Image (spheres, grey):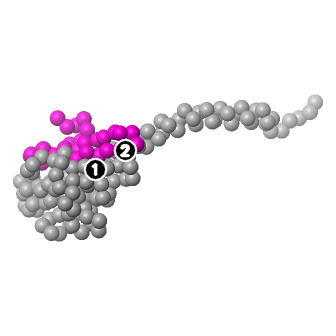
Amino acid sequence: MQLRNGFSLIELMVVIAIIAIIAGIGVPSFRNLTLDNRLSSTANNLLGSLRIARSEAVTQRTAITVCAANTDNTDCADSTNWTAGVLLMRGSEVIRVIPGAASGLTIASSHDDVTFRPNGTITPTLLLTISEAERSKTHQVKVNAIGQACSGSACP
């Protein structure tokens, strides 16, 4: 009787075929998961920034402006496209710089900027729409007149 060590070529090919089938089923689902996480992460980053701006306005008893960043992140851009980044400003002083959206995402705003008053309110209300071109999927961040920011299904 002859002793065999290892696998035959046929056994190895069957295992490789099974791995290929499983990978073919799993990769598209993983891609969608990655894209959904990128969209949610950008929305949550904006939501957190808006909440920080409101908190700073109330705590410091001064107006805080949130706006689209210019190319060198030193001043507000006169644009409703917030894809390049977002600035939190106290007067002409930049308090915080929020980096731009990940590639493939765009952030559109209903206004060039929004200013939180010392009591935490804003005028007018703000709507940010984060869009993903690849799957035509969007996510919204809203700020109502009393300054509360919400996102997704948490918004009334």
Can residue 13 be seen here? The reply is yes
Per the image, the residue denoted by label 1 is 107
Q: Residue shown at 65%/32% (left/top)?
A: 18
Image location (x, y in percent) of residue 63:
9, 60
Looking at the picture, tell me which residue is in the foreground, 109 or 87: 109
- Badge 2: residue crowd in 10 Å (few <14, some 14–19, many ≥20): few
Q: Earlier in the sequence, mark 2 or mark 1?
A: 1
- Left or right of 144, for residue 48: right
Q: Is residue 71 above or below residue 117?
A: below
Total marks placed: 2
Placement of 74 over or under 86, stated as above or below: below
Residue stretch in magenta:
128-156
Instruction: Give the quadrant of residue 25.
Output: top right
Give me the residue at 14% from left, 65% from top. 90
Q: In this view, does 151 lie above or below 93?
A: above
Between residue 148 and residue 103, name the one nearer to us: 103
Q: Which mark is in front, 2 or 1?
A: 2
Give the labeled residue for mark 2. 133
Quadrant (top left, top right, bottom left, bottom right) of the N terminus: top right
Q: How far apart are marks 2 and 1 (CA)?
A: 11 Å
At label 2, the amino acid type is Ala
Disc 1 residue type (three-letter)? Ile
Quarter of the rendering containing residue 85: bottom left
Q: What SS does tag 1 mark?
A: strand
Q: How crowded is mark 1: few (under 14 residues within 10 Å), some or many (20 or more)?
A: many
Res. 52 visible in picture = no
Say left or right for 46 vs 112. Answer: right
Say which element carries label 2: loop
- Residue 124 percent coordinates (x, y): 9, 49
Q: Residue 34 carries which label?
A: none
